[in-house]
Structure formats: structure tokens, C-alpha cells
Image (spheres, grey):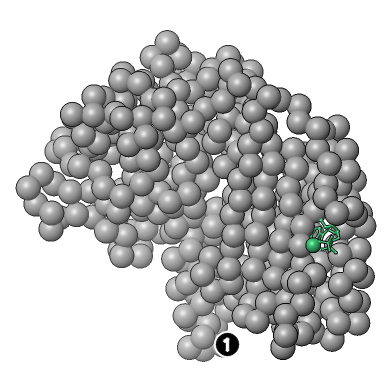
Amino acid sequence: MTKQPGDSFGTELDELGEFGLIDRLTKNIKLQQSSTHKGVGDDAAVIVPENDQMLVSSDMMLEGIHFDLTYTPLKHLGYKAVAVNISDIAAMNGTCSQITVNIGLSNKFSLEAVEELYEGIHQACAHYGCDLVGGDTTSSGTGLVISVTAIGSVASDKLVTRSEAKIHDLICVSGDLGAAYVGLQILEREKQVFLSDSEMQPQLEAYEYIVGRQLKAEARTDVVQWFYDSGIVPTAMIDISDGLASDLLHICKQSGVGARIYEDKLPIDTTTKDAALELKLNPTTVALNGGEDYELLFTVSQEHHGKVDDQQGISIIGHIMDASQGTEMSLAQGDLVTIEAQGWRHFGNSKSRGTIE
Ligand code: ADP
Ligand code: MG
């Protein structure tokens, strides 16, 4: 624990003390991975890698910036903090075997609150089959900070980066897009209603799917397993955290290619569409720029067309082109628009650029 002057834990955490807290949070860990030789309890964890390529990824989440505890249950937050890191490992076509968790706690948190957060972390570890092997605990002056590092590996012949997409490759995406963003807008709307009249309870039943996509993020490790089982190694892959548009542009830029995607091929759930329209948002814009989908965007060579086409929950949304042809989307009515990191633009008319607002 890194004590800082002036920082203090709430009574219960104070009573427990640093080692008591760490003990409570980690005492029930059952190590699942043979690669974990030593977990929590020493100065460092000991891991014996199973594959030749190790993968390490880290993400930090700050209260007020990345999450709002008015509508985010701590258990879901703990789960999500792990899932988003595992998603990054999945996007390299790898599997996660260990995580470490660093937390900063302000004095408003009770032991029960921290235990709830850890329940989500433990659930995610159980679900994804990885071990919590260490971390650090510190007091924080302002709200909750949670930073997870995921450690994984992949065989070198299965490693997938963002930079090897080839002309004519198919562009594919798992699941559906835009739901997490629309879910967040609904949560924000209900929060404002609640703040103006605390008698008003949030009406979320109709939005269960999209709100769930925001609060209960999952990493698509099942898609990675399907790649292994069906003998597909994508040429490039990224997980969609910032939105399809921005993440497709990452692949195109790093692979030195262009792309053509089709608006009518974008997978958008009907609940997402309906809620987007209700919020006066364009469903296509939401699918392109929403972010936090944690779906996998990948490119595969044409030889795999049959396999990806047959696979439920995988959509072929376009194909890779020469860089000189740009990165464009063909709209349902036929117009071609240039994809930008935040929206799209009709040729010669930057004013019609779609934005997320
Ligand atoms: P040190 O002083 O050597 O850094 P700590 O007292 O911070 O050790 O931590 C003791 C053990 O508990 C270490 O194995 C560490 O990885 C683990 N640990 C500390 N904080 C956490 C946490 N928030 N979550 C999981 N493990 C933790
Ligand atoms: Mg430490």
C-alpha cells in the first residue's frame, strides 16, 4: 500500500489495515492456470509462459472519467475492468492466463464496497479462466481508480496484429455494434431524471439489452476459440473499443491499405436501432462511432469466405482495397462516404460529417 499524506481510508478499511484488506480480497483465489507458479503473497508473481509470444496489456479506469458510480454497480465495474483487458489479448488472437489489479480507494469506500468490486473481478477470472496473481492497493484523494494488467500468450504462427491486412481480404465483425453507446445514453438520461426528481425511479426494462452491453462488457474469447477450431488466422484484428470507424482506420493505417464497407451490412440490434431513434441519434453513426462494443473487427483472406459466411454472429461488412482508394462506406442508398474517426463525410462537403452528438 502506498500511503500518501492526508489520505485516509473509511473506518472499516482503516480498522482492517492494508494487509487485512489484501488478505480479505485475495484469500479465496484458486489458481487455475498451470503457468502460474506463484500468485499473490510474495514480492512478485512467478509465471512460466506456455507459448513463445507473451502478450501484456493494461487499461486504467478512473471514476468520473471512465465510469459513473451512480449507475454502475461495483461488481459490474470489476468484471468490466478485467473483460476490457482480456479483449485486448483476444484482439491479438491470444488467450489471457493472468491478471494483476491496482486499485486506488478514497475514504468513501467501505470494505463491503471493495469486496463487491472484487467479486466482479473474481467472476471475470473464473469466466475467462485466468488467475489474479497480484496488484497494488493505495489510497486515492478523489474517487476510485482501477487499473488491470492482463498477461497472456499466443503461438507465433497464430499471432495477429493490426498491420497485415491485405487487398481483397474480407472485413468482418463479431456480434452487433452501437448498443453499449446507446445504453450509456439511456443511463445518462435516467440519471438526469433521477437527479431532478429523486421520486422518479429509472425505467430501464425496455433497454435491458443495451444497458447490459454498457454495464456488462464481455471479451469475445469465444471468437478466438472459433478461429483456433476452424483453422482461421485473421490477417489483422483489433477489438472495437473506440468505435468501428476509428478502429477500422487503425487497421487501414497500420496495414497501409484502404477499405470499403457497406452501411446495410453493419450489424445493429433492433433494440439499439429503436433506442437510437428515440434519442434522435442516427443508428449508423452510433454503430460507427459508439465505442465500447468490445467486439472483434478482423480481416481474413478470401479463401475463408465460406467459413465466415456460415458462422452465426459474424458479419462480413466489406473488403480491403488499395490505399489509393481510401476508406469508404457505401450508404444504403448508394452514395460513397469517406470514413473518419468521428463520423463520415460526403465528398466535397465536410459539413455533412456525421457526429455522435
Ligand atoms: P509490496 O509491499 O511488496 O508491494 P504489497 O503489500 O503491496 O506488497 O502486496 C502484498 C501482496 O498482495 C503482493 O503479492 C501483491 O501483488 C498483492 N496485492 C496487493 N494489492 C493487491 C490488490 N489490490 N489486488 C490483488 N493483489 C494485491
Ligand atoms: Mg505493492
Instruction: Find the residue positioned furthest to the left.
Output: 348
Q: Position of residue 91 (x, y in %)?
A: 54, 36
Find residue 202 and report its image quarter. Answer: bottom right
Residue at (18%, 41%) from the top-left corner?
A: 337
Instruction: Report the amino acid beneath label 1.
Output: Glu
Q: Residues within 10 Å of mark 1 (few under 14, many from 20)?
A: few
Residue at (30%, 20%) from the top-left corner?
A: 167
Q: Give the camera-side residue of 80 and 334.
A: 80
Quadrant, the C terminus: bottom left
Q: Position of residue 178 (x, y in %)?
A: 42, 50
Quadrant, the N terminus: bottom right
Residue at (29%, 28%) from the top-left corner?
A: 257
Disc 1 residue: CB within 8 Å of ligand 1? no
Q: Mark 1 — residue?
A: 199
Up-down relation of residue 265 to residue 68 (above or below): above
Q: How many marks?
A: 1
User: Could one spot residue 112 in this view of the protein?
Assistant: yes
Which structural element holds mark 1? Answer: loop
Up-down relation of residue 221 to residue 3 (above or below): above
Q: Give the camera-side residue of 16 and 270.
A: 16
Q: Is residue 165 left or right of residue 229?
A: left
Q: Position of residue 244 (x, y in %)?
A: 38, 44
Q: Position of residue 61 (x, y in %)?
A: 59, 63
